[in-house]
Every structure is written in C-alpha cells, then in structure tokens.
C-alpha cells in the first residue's frame, strides 16, 4: 500500500500515467473553478477571487509544463539511461493528484480577502477562522506528499538515484516554481 501511495510510478508510467493524471487534472480544474482555488505555482495553491474555467485549466497546464521541462532537461543531462518525455510528463501529471484534495479543501468557508492588499482587519479575521487553521494544517502534509510523489516520479523516470537525484530534483523544482509563476503572471497579466 505504501508503494501505491508514494511511488505508483513503478507500476504506472508513460501514456497510461498521462491519461490517468490528465483525467485527474481535468477534475481538479473543475473543482478549483468552483472552490476558487488557484494553482498559481508548481507547488502552491491560493484561494480567493473567482475565476473562469479556462484560467483554472491554464494554471494546471502551465504547472505541469513547468515541472516537466526542467525535469526532462535535467534527466537528459544527468542520467546515464534513456529518458523519455512521455515518462516524465505522465508521471508528473499523475504525481499532481494531491492537488485535487487541495482544491476540495478550498470549499471550506474561509473569508479570504479578495483585494491585492488586505486590511489588518481582514487578516485578523482570516487568522481567527477555525476553518482556515484546519485548512492550513491539512494543506501542509498534502504539499509534502505532492513533493514526495514528484521526487519519485522524477527518480523513476530518469533512473537517477541518491545524491544526483536529490540535487537535480531540488534544482528542477526551484526552476519549475519560478517558471510557473512568471509564465502565469505573463499569461494572466497579474
């Protein structure tokens, strides 16, 4: 059971992982649209302002591409074996399934400020909301789980192990976060 929760990529990869992960991404985008969740970075989620469905789908797609590109390039550079793009994109798509749970958490009745600069009163109201505290407590392990899944997806798809895998994964994750933030800001004019 532990392997299915943290490393299903030894069983599912390539096109099959992409189809399952892609289906989950579509469901996540729908849930995010209705729950007002925004995946405006490769590793993060914010709640608040309403959006249109195409924006929810765009955020998920840009996040997937932002993770896939550096992981593929780093895998090709540092792996001694063949690294296939379909394996990277498929396993990364499947690894993002905890984001569906994050989008569901966004349905909690939390009074998120909708403006760019929330007032101190809005911030105190948010911090005093018990649903917000529960949401934060549940979000942290889901993000950690997502990172563990992404690491295993990367490691299995690139055949990298130990130190080389860890260092290149961290570099790829940082690049992916910056790439997704910049790309989404440009595309959505934020």
Image (cartoon, rainbow, N blue to C red):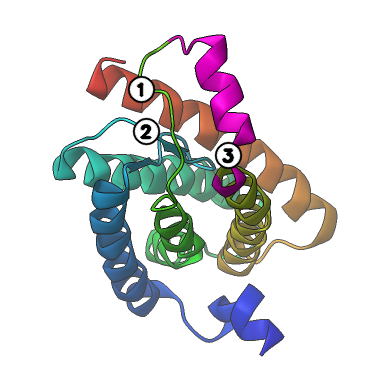
Q: Nearer the viewer, residue 100 or 73?
A: 100
Q: Is residue 121 above or below residue 162?
A: above
Toward the right, the furthest residue is 163
The majority secondary structure of the magenta stretch comes to: helix
Dot 2 falls on a residue whose secondary structure is: loop
Q: Nearer the viewer, mark 3 or mark 1?
A: 3
Q: Which residue is mark 2?
A: 48
- 93 drawn magenta: no
Q: Is residue 144 above or below residue 127?
A: below
- Circle 1/circle 2 CB separation < 8 Å: yes
Q: Which mark is residue 114?
A: 1
Q: Nearer the viewer, residue 38 or 75?
A: 38
Q: Which residue is mark 3?
A: 129
Q: Nearer the viewer, residue 143 or 78?
A: 143
Q: Nearer the viewer, mark 3 or mark 2?
A: 3
In the rendered image, which quarter is residue 132 located in? top right
């Amino acid at each position: 059971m532990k392997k299915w929760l943290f490393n299903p990529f030894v069983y599912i990869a390539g096109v099959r992982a992409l189809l399952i992960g892609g289906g989950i991404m579509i469901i996540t985008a729908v849930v995010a649209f209705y729950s007002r969740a925004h995946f405006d970075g490769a590793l993060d989620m914010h709640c608040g302002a309403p959006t249109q469905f195409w924006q929810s789908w765009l955020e998920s797609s840009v996040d997937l591409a932002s993770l896939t590109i550096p992981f593929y390039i780093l895998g090709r550079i540092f792996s001694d074996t063949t690294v296939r793009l379909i394996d990277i994109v498929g396993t990364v798509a499947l690894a993002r399934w905890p984001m569906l749970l994050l989008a569901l958490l966004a349905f909690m009745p939390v009074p998120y400020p909708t403006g760019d600069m929330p007032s101190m009163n809005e911030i105190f109201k948010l911090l005093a909301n018990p649903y917000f505290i529960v949401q934060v407590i549940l979000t942290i392990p889901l993000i950690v789980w997502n990172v563990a899944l992404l690491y295993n997806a990367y490691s299995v798809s690139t055949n990298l192990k130990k130190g080389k895998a860890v260092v290149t994964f961290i570099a790829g994750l940082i690049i992916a976060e910056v790439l997704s933030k910049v790309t989404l800001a440009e595309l959505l004019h934020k």
